[in-house]
Image (spheres, rainbow, N blue to C red):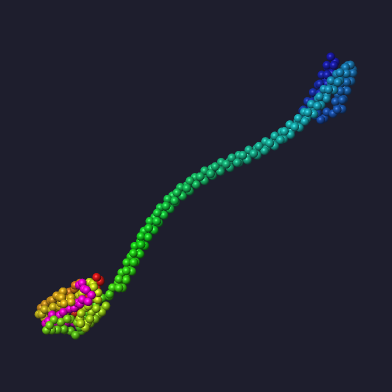
């Protein structure tokens, strides 16, 4: 009974010591071997008084050693636990930083996705605009091509026209210039004569090509062609006929006549177009017994010109 009581007392002491170390009182490091030996000596003296056997002391020593080892191991475990907690806190801090960065990255990704969506929409709009511009460009190219074709056609026609103009210029340059306009005389009344006479228009107003001779009164065709002729005469005799004829070579082709009944001057006017061969002659003839009148006002005239060569 006494052995059991002593053993229980030692165990209670060890438990109290361990409890104090856990609650912040005496720790494992504070229990020195001197204090343990004092407790053992106290127990030993009590045991001597109660006559405890030496085997109990050996068991108590072993229990003491085991308690010390357990406290040392417990301290190491506490230190390791503290280090692990420190590392865990650091890891949690890192995790928090990483989570913050991850959230920022996710927000950036979402923002980039929104921007990408906007860019895709703008790209689609740009592609549509580009397609429209391509269509407009194609239409413009077609119109430009058509315009160039028209321009080429116009240039070709212009070249043809220019060539024709040049040919006409050459033809005109080669074509003889034939035209005359004549007045009869400044002496007043001419006639009457006993026979038909060729009127010689002595007042040359124009005589291009010099085809008319005021000496002979004949117009000589320089080339084969169509010619226009006209005549105007005035006669002052009252109650008389006035007859002037136009001859082609020896053939009368125009007869102009009028009767003056005494009411004023007798006027004749006529014209025609003749086809002449080169060397043909044209002239005016006054009938025998008739008269014509002219002065500086050119009342009696003879005109002609080449329409075109044949």
| In the foreground, 121 or 97 | 121
| In the foreground, 177 or 189 | 177
| In the foreground, 19 or 295 | 295
Q: Residue extending furthest top?
A: 1
Q: Quadrant of the N terminus?
A: top right
Per the image, is 278 magenta? Answer: yes
Residue 82 image point, x, y percent: 74, 33
Residue 199 image point, x, y percent: 18, 81
Q: Is residue 237 left or right of residue 129?
A: left
| In the foreground, 85 or 168 | 168
Residue 95 can be seen in this image: yes
Say above or below: 41 vs 113: above
* Range shown magenta: 274-297
Per the image, is 126 magenta? Answer: no
Residue 217 image point, x, y percent: 20, 81
Residue 119 image point, x, y percent: 52, 46
Q: Quadrant of residue 175?
A: bottom left
Residue at the image position 44 percent from the left and 49 percent from the top: 132
Residue 206 can be seen in this image: no
Residue at the image position 14 percent from the left and 75 percent from the top: 255
């Amino acid at each position: 009974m006494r052995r059991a009581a002593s053993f229980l007392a030692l165990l209670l002491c060890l438990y109290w010591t361990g409890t104090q170390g856990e609650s912040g009182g005496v720790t494992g490091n504070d229990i020195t071997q001197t204090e343990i030996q004092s407790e053992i000596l106290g127990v030993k003296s009590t045991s001597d008084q109660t006559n405890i056997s030496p085997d109990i002391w050996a068991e108590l020593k072993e229990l003491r050693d085991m308690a010390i080892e357990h406290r040392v191991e417990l301290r190491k475990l506490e230190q390791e636990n503290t280090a692990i907690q420190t590392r865990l806190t650091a890891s949690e801090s890192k995790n928090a930083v990483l989570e913050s960065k991850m959230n920022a990255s996710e927000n950036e990704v979402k923002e980039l996705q929104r921007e990408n969506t906007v860019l895709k929409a703008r790209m689609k709009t740009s592609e549509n605009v580009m397609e429209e511009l391509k269509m407009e460009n194609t239409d413009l190219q077609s119109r430009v091509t058509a315009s160039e074709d028209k321009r080429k056609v116009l240039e070709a026609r212009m070249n043809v026209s220019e060539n024709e103009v040049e040919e006409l210029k050459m033809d005109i340059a080669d074509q003889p210039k034939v035209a005359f306009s004549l007045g009869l005389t400044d002496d007043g009344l001419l006639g009457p004569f006993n026979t038909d006479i060729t009127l010689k228009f002595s007042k040359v107003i124009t005589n291009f090509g010099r085809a008319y001779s005021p000496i002979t009164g004949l117009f000589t065709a320089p080339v084969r062609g169509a010619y226009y002729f006209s005549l105007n005469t005035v006669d002052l005799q009252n109650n008389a006929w006035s007859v002037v004829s136009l001859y082609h070579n020896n053939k009368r082709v125009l007869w102009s006549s009028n009767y003056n009944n005494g009411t004023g001057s007798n006027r004749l006017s006529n014209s025609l177009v003749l086809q002449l061969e080169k060397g043909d002659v044209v002239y005016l003839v006054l009938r025998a017994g008739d008269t014509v009148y002219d002065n500086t006002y050119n009342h009696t005239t003879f005109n002609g010109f080449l329409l075109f060569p044949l």
